[in-house]
Amino acid sequence: MQNLEKLLKKSIKSFGFLSVKDFFNIVLHHESFGYYRKNNILGKKGDFTTSPEISQVFGEVLCNSILLNSKLIEGYRNVSYIELGPGKGSLAEDILRTLKKLNHTLFLNIKNIYFLEKSEIFYSHLKKLFSSVNIIDDIEKIPNSYNIIFANEFFDALPVSQYVFTKQRWREVLITLNKKEEFIFSLSRKPTKINYCFPNNPSENYIFEYSEYMINLLESICQKVSQYGGIFFIIDYARNNKKNESSLSAIKNHKKVDVFHELGNCDVSHSPDFDLIKKICKNNNCRIFGPFSQSLFLQNYGINERIEFLIDKNPKLKNQLLLQKNRLIGEKYMGNIFKVLIITDNNNYKFL
Ligand SMILES: C[S@@+](CC[C@H](N)C(=O)[O-])C[C@H]1O[C@@H](n2cnc3c(N)ncnc32)[C@H](O)[C@@H]1O
């Protein structure tokens, strides 16, 4: 039996259960055996590939949507670029390179780069890649400046608690052991005390997923954005709230596996609830644009033209570039399931 499995079973035997959030927090971030301690999780040779790792065009096109609003931003002399869970830093490289080339004034106004990154492996990688960067572990450390913030596949990596609405009450989903000592999901007997985040009038067996960490993080960012100005892009899998099912999933070597499979060796994630994110941001005095499908957003800001331009410059790469485009915007790939949500201060931004 693997170390992490032993450790989690011991903990469940002592306490009777673990919450879904605590269980997956240990699976992802345990100081010795957690998934984010593994090398090479991201990319072709790893377990999953994200949009910035598929193509530089992803960041370049996202940057266009900022450039088209640059009149509103250029007036700020102190701008920070912030990324949540930047991983290998590819998105930051692509966005900052594009900004430097296409709007040098705005680029020069970027005085600081902040990365919120928990993995020590990515931390060392980012320190080597960026000569001057602040890598933080607490969102409260982001500055009181105009902030351009990106979170690509960050929210899906945050462990969530789960609650089921049954017989007019919310009950927390817990992880326990069956007689064969296998992990199973069970329901708490005690009803849960709810807060404003829980949906109103849910249907029977509706599953609600959230974490207090995520709420606090969003509230903190929105307060900075509304007070000091900013644009915050969230790009992620979106939970389909019409489906009454858990959105937890696990992946290893680019294939879906059971969420209890080889704990600490597989990436476990959930699909963020964009309705909930919108609710929190609106509550904190920010404007919301979207969510738009990744396909619509990237096409609107020029992915087709950019790919054609790159093919013209290097015709030998035609098939590779078209393949990359298809992975980013194809309906069967990331085009529809990934959504782009933009949160801004109350200025007159325009998106789509
Ligand atoms: C799925 S990866 C996405 C990486 C990158 N954004 C990309 O698109 O390639 C999730 C990232 O979030 C980081 N992460 C997960 N939980 C975190 C937390 N609580 N605080 C800071 N970073 C976290 C991971 O270390 C990793 O860099």
Image (tube, grey):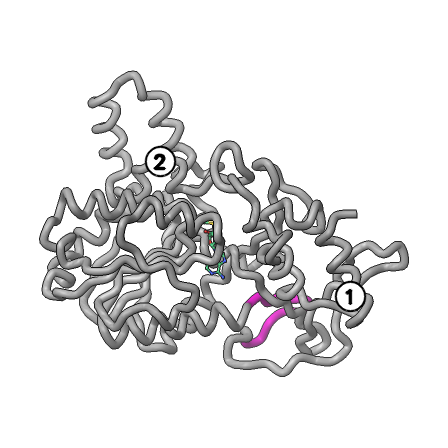
- Residue plotted at (47% across, 58% down): 118
Indicate the position of residue 114 as horizontal and vertical percent values: 32, 60
Please state the horizontal and vertical placement of residue 207, each as a whole percent of the image.
63, 65
Does the magenta run of residues contain 2?
Answer: no
For label 2, the SS is: loop
Tag 1: residue type? Ile
Q: Which residues are magenta?
A: 200-210
Q: Which residue is mark 2?
A: 55
Residue placed at 68% from the left, 72% from the top? Answer: 172
**CA gap, disc 2 and disc 1:** 43 Å
Q: Amino acid at mark 2?
A: Ser
**Residue matched to label 1:** 12
Total marks placed:
2
Q: Position of residue 3 (x, y in %)?
A: 73, 51
For the point 63% across and 83% down, which residue is it? 193
- Decide if ligand 1 comes within 8 Å of the CB at mark 1: no
Against 169, residue 184 (above or below) is above
Q: Residue at x 62, y 45 (%)?
A: 266
Relative side of 48 to 13, left or right = left
Disc 1 secondary structure class: helix
The first of marks 2 and 1 along the sequence is 1
**Image check: 180 left or right of 335?**
right
Residue 207 lies in the magenta-colored region: yes
Q: Main secondary structure of the magenta part?
A: loop
Judge by depth and name the residue closer to the eye, 217 or 118: 118
Q: Position of residue 255 (x, y in %)?
A: 61, 37
Q: Is residue 342 above or below residue 92?
A: below
Q: Quadrant of residue 329?
A: top left
